[in-house]
Amino acid sequence: MRNYDFAPLTRSTVGFDRVFDLLDSAFTASQTDEGYPPYNIVKTGETSYRIELAVAGFGPGDLSIVAQENVLTVSGSKNSSQQQLYLHHGIASRAFERRFNLADYVKVAKADLVNGLLTIDLVREIPEAMRPRQIQIGGERKQPEQIEQQAA
C-alpha cells in the first residue's frame, strides 16, 4: 500500500488538525481492517443515520458501545468461562473493536440488539447558535420623500 505524508500540508494550515488526523487514521485503518464484524451505514432521514452490525452469537452483556468526543467505539468479547466442545465451530465469537468517526454534533440516540443485529441510531443535533438564520437587509424601508416641483 502507499504511504501518504501530510506534513507539508499541516505546516501551512491552521485549525485543520482534525481533518488530517482523520485522513491519516483512514489510511492506516484500511490497511489493518479485518472486516469483522460486517456492518452497514444507512441514512434514515435528513439528520439521522443508523449503523447496523452483524454480531451473531453476542449478547447484550458481551457488547460495549462507547461514544467519546467524535468517535463511536463498538467492542465485543465473549465470556470464555463456558468452555464447550464443538464438533463444528462456524460462528465467529472472537473479540472485536470497531471504531466510527462521527461528525460534529452527531449523538447516539439509541442502540438495540435483535436477532444478532446490533443497530445504533445516530442523530445530528446542531445547536441553535450554529444553525443558519435569515438576515434582513436594511431593516425597515422608508418611502422616499417626494420633492415638490416648482415651475420655472
Image: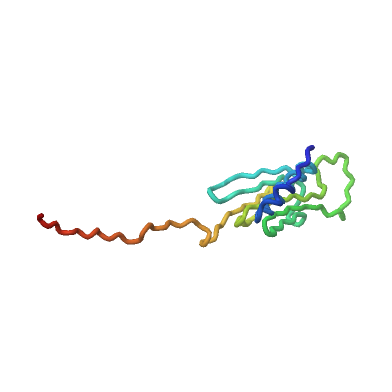
Q: Residue furthest top?
A: 1
Camera-nearest residue between 20 and 77: 20
> Which quadrant is the N terminus positioned in?
top right
Give the percent coordinates (x, y) of residue 55. Answer: 74, 47
Give the percent coordinates (x, y) of residue 74. Answer: 73, 53
Q: How many marks?
A: 0
Q: What residue appears at the point 81 percent right and 52 percent down from the top-left corner?
A: 78
The coloring applied to the image is rainbow
Camera-nearest residue between 146 and 88: 146
Give the percent coordinates (x, y) of residue 80. Answer: 86, 53
Can you see residue 14?
A: yes
Give the percent coordinates (x, y) of residue 151. Answer: 9, 55
Camera-nearest residue between 75 and 127: 127
Q: Residue furthest front?
A: 152
> Which quadrant is the C terminus positioned in?
bottom left
Q: What residue appears at the point 54 percent right and 48 percent down from the top-left corner?
A: 45
Can you see residue 25?
A: no
